[in-house]
Amino acid sequence: MSLSAAEPGSRGGERARADYSSRRAAGGSASCPPGEPMEPTEGAEEERLVQCPVCLQELPGADINAHLDRCLQAGGAQPEPPSKRPRLAAAPPGSQAEGQPEQARPAAGSPVFSLFHKGRGGGQSPAAAGGRSGAGRDEAPVQPGHGCAAAPCGESLAHKLQGKPLAERLRPDTLGDYVGQEPVLGAQTLLRSLLESHEIPSLILWGPPGCGKTTLAHIIANSSKKNGMRFVTLSATSAKTNDVRDVISQAQNEKRLFKRKTILFIDEIHRFNKSQQDTFLPHVECGTVTLIGATTENPSFQVNAALLSRCRVIVLEKLSVEAMEAILMRAVRFLGLRVLGQSDQHGTPATGSSSKSSEFPVYIEEKALNTLAYLCDGDARTGLNGLQLAVQARIAAGSTTTKGGAADGILVTEEHIKEGLQRSHILYDRAGEEHYNCISALHKSMRGSDENASLYWLARMLEGGEDPLYVARRLVRFASEDIGLADPLALTQAVAAYQGCHFIGMPECEVILAQCVVYFARAPKSIEVYRAYGKVKECLRMHTGPLPPVPLHLRNAPTRLMKNLGYGKGYKYNPMYKGPVEQDYLPQELKGTDFFKEQET
Ligand SMILES: Nc1ncnc2c1ncn2[C@@H]1O[C@H](COP(=O)(O)OP(=O)(O)OP(=O)(O)O)[C@@H](O)[C@H]1O
């Protein structure tokens, strides 16, 4: 036997299979039942640990063929390697492993990270606690359609509001239910035709929170699954480089052994550092994995340029008020609420109503829905959670009303919606005017050395859901523009604050920003450099004709030819002189210009 320790996907794997076949033909130990000890074989080679090319488990060389036999029969699934962490989940529905006995599927913790699948244990998603998408999410399927999506008809309203957040229950499964994003997903768009023909390119989905990035990936997962592809998901907030490597080697094996393609979805890809992102590069390049990354950050800054050039960047916009209204109406139908229009005092039951008739009818003002669609600022998760919270609160309060002549029931008004949103989401328009107004107020408060106002505006933004890195970037600018050389350490503080925010994110990073903001409010201020640089720029802008050449004595002369042309000639090397050196550094035309001279006002 000559099987050597092989990297998954390497030629050693082929040799393993060849060896496996020949031993099998010879009636060798390949027929050992699982769990039985293998017969010892001769030779030192057998004592070496060999990695199974299918499941990556390391075994003594003597055991590998029988193990490989079982591994291949189990469709590439073997008991988990000891090093795997429990957040790795099981095989996707529709995958080859799905139809196999439970023990033959990849166990939780196997290198298969397939998460967009029907929950086996029916456990509650981590998102049920209000969490965002993450590694290990175990989602229940949502049926296409409206009224009874994800819930059997007749299920009570209280039951529908329990467990998973509404936003998760209503996550669309098909493009048909995906609302908005017309510029990238409308009819006739390239992406739609690619998705419809199951030609999925590597993608980076970039857009603000709650605009549908994960949902789009979820839809792609459903369609690719039907097409026999594997869909594996990782969250960059929790996955380590080793997890990525595991996924890649599993993808290599799947491709080699079962000719199955793997789509790897990485949520919050910007949280991977550049070297972690490098891990995918060659595998995206050679087509072992199709990468779908989701990010709320500008990928030009946060995603490795080489990786970026191999992916199509899809820019998703925050959802429009109309799109939000459509999403909320779908939720209203699902919950079986009755919309109480301004002109319709009796309330129009939403089609697909599924509330049990024994329950009080629940009414919601049309105005309340419009306000919610407006206030959630294009974030569908906030909108749906806001609706859920308001309805739950009203049901818990057990209020009944006969307002407006409607039958006895529970009424959700605009005020209730605002109250619910206020509690979970300070009214703050992250992309609109409020965003600029607040950052401007913060900047001016720090400039005016008002530490209280500075902290106030900072909190207004952060509590309203502002991206802490946006604030941190402004602080970096402020450190140079307003403090400058009056305290050069300010810049170090700002850069450190930016990095701190990048490392730990919200909510922990809020105090980092608070410290930096107070430091800046208290710091001495100087705009000397800022102003002088402005004057230099103006000087360049106002210049007419060709720009003056760099004086010859200031030029470097790395070659003989350049020396002969007079480059560097007459240059006085300052360290060689004890006293001040008489030498011009500005072009002749600008001799004596002082950009630092204060202008008389
Ligand atoms: N375009 C859409 N059409 C219908 N529902 C949507 C759409 N976008 C989002 N939703 C709803 O909002 C919820 C949250 O959306 P999703 O998780 O896709 O946001 P995201 O862009 O990935 O946000 P984040 O960056 O915060 O993870 C979904 O579960 C779904 O119910």
Image (spheres, rainbow, N blue to C red):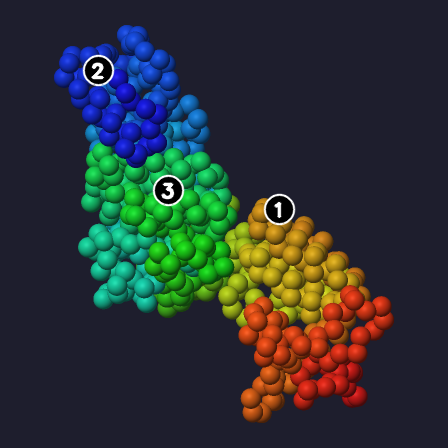
Categorize mark 1 by other alpha carbons within 10 Å: few (<14), some (14-19), many (20+): few
Q: What residue does disc 2 label? A: 30
Marks 3 and 1 sit apart, C-alpha to C-alpha, by 26 Å
Marks 2 and 3 sit apart, C-alpha to C-alpha, by 34 Å
Which label's residue is closer to the chain start, 1 or 2?
A: 2
Question: In percent of the image, x 77 and y 69: which residue is there?
Answer: 574
Instruction: Give the tally of numbered discs.
Output: 3
x then y, percent, for residue 518? 74, 58
> Which is more toward the observer, 500 or 1?
1
Q: Which mark is residue 233?
A: 3
Q: Quadrant of the N terminus?
A: top left
x then y, percent, for residue 237? 49, 43
Q: What residue does disc 1 label? A: 508
Q: Quick one: which residue is furthest to the right in this view?
A: 579
Callout 1 amino acid: Glu
x then y, percent, for residue 328? 38, 57
Residue 208, quarter of the rendered image: bottom left
Callout 3 amino acid: Thr
Question: In percent of the image, x 69 and y 67: which residue is there?
Answer: 480
Marks 1 and 2 sit apart, C-alpha to C-alpha, by 55 Å
Q: Regarding mark 1 in the picture, which secondary structure is present there?
A: loop
Callout 2 amino acid: Ala
Question: In percent of the image, x 29 and y 22: which residue is there?
Answer: 3
Disc 2, ligand 1: is the CB inside 8 Å? no
Q: Quick one: which residue is furthest to the bottom in this view?
A: 544
- 487 sits left or right of 27 in the view: right
Which label's residue is closer to the chain start, 2 or 3?
A: 2
> Which is more toward the observer, 261 or 592?
592
